[in-house]
Image (cartoon, rainbow, N blue to C red):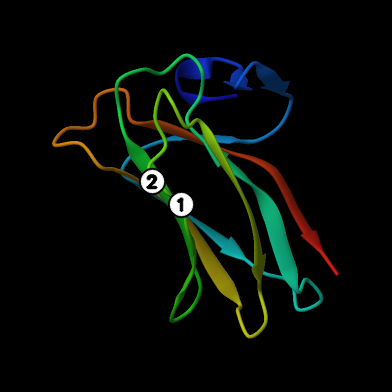
Amino acid sequence: EGVDGKPIIVKGVIYTSGLGTHANSEIKIRVKNNSPFLSGKCGYPDYASGANVQCEIRGNSRILFKSTALNNDHREEPFRVSLEGEKDITLAFRTLNPDINSAHGVWVDLLTRD
């Protein structure tokens, strides 16, 4: 589910699993040693409107991925990052607006793989 218990829908696609969040947020994840890559998409859900948000994936000491601004015109951004040397990562969403109104975000299709 997305924020407010709504289904996760990005660009008309309904996702049955994922993480819904509200900016500014951080989700900490422990990485298994045998997971060299993380892939997926971060997005601005279809029910939200009017905000500009950005997603970021951080490792122990570096930024692994930073999206462009996500908003009404640019709703999702795929990623594939190397987890080499990382034990913990942080999935972060932040607002690029002065306030957090409608600053919703989603993480979908998250997969660790070889």
Q: Which residue type does callout 2 highlight?
A: Gln
Mark 2 neighbour class, 10 Å CA radius: few under 14, some 14 to 19, many 20 or more:
many
Q: Which residue type does callout 1 highlight?
A: Ser
Residue at which label 1 appears: 67
Quarter that holds the C terminus = bottom right
Q: Can you tell which quarter of the image residue 72 is in? A: top left
How far from the left and from the top, in percent, is residue 40?
68, 48
In-image side of 93 versus 34 (left or right)? left
Q: Is residue 39 above or below residue 106?
A: below
**Which sits in the foreground, 95 or 4?**
95
Q: Give the residue furthest to the right.
A: 114
How far apart are the alpha carbons under marks 1 and 2? 6 Å
Q: Are marks 1 and 2 in contact (CB under 8 Å)?
A: yes
Nearest to N terminus: mark 1 or mark 2: 2
The residue shown at (67%, 69%) is 31
Residue at which label 2 appears: 54
In-image side of 10 versus 22 (left or right)? right
